Amino acid sequence: MISHRFVYKALGYLSILIGIFAALSIYKIQFAFYGIALGILGFIISGLNIFLNVKYYYEEEKYPKGYIGMVLSSLPVLFMLFVIMKHRH
C-alpha cells in the first residue's frame, strides 16, 4: 500500500518538474501548445499536492512544493496572454 506521505512528496517533486518543462516551453513560440498542455497538467498535480498538504501535513511543512510548481506552470499561460495582448494593440 502506498502511503500518503509518498504520494505527497512525489506529487510535489513532479509538479516542480512539470513546471520547469512548462516554463522552458516559452523559449520558442512553436512549443507554446505543449507548454499550455504541461501547464494544465502542472496545475492539476500542484493542486493535488496543496490539497494533501492542507489535509494531512499542514503543521509540518509551511509552503508545499506545489506552490512552486503552480507558479512555474502558470508561466506559459501568462506568456501567451502577454503575446496576445501585445499583438492586439
Image: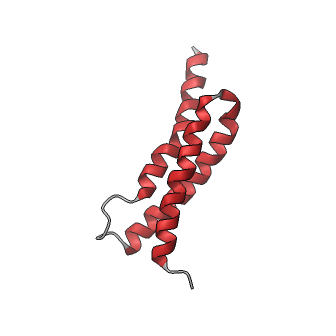
Colouring used for the render: secondary structure
Q: How many marks?
A: 0
Q: Give the quadrant of the N terminus.
A: bottom right
Query: On the picture, is 66 further left or further right than 73?
Result: left
Residue 18 spot, x, y in % from top left: 57, 50
Residue 53 spot, x, y in % from top left: 40, 67
The image quarter containing residue 56 is bottom left
> Residue sitting at 52 percent across and 63 percent down?
11
Q: Give the quadrant of the C terminus.
A: top right
Asked if residue 42 is positioned above or below residue 76 in the image, the reply reads below
Along the viewing direction, whichever of 89 and 49 lies nearer the viewer: 49
Query: On the picture, is 24 further left or further right than 61?
Result: right
Along the viewing direction, whichever of 24 and 69 lies nearer the viewer: 24
Residue 8 spot, x, y in % from top left: 47, 69
> Residue sitting at 38 percent across and 68 percent down?
54
Asked if residue 23 is positioned above or below residue 11 in the image, the reply reads above
> Residue sitting at 64 percent across and 28 percent down?
28
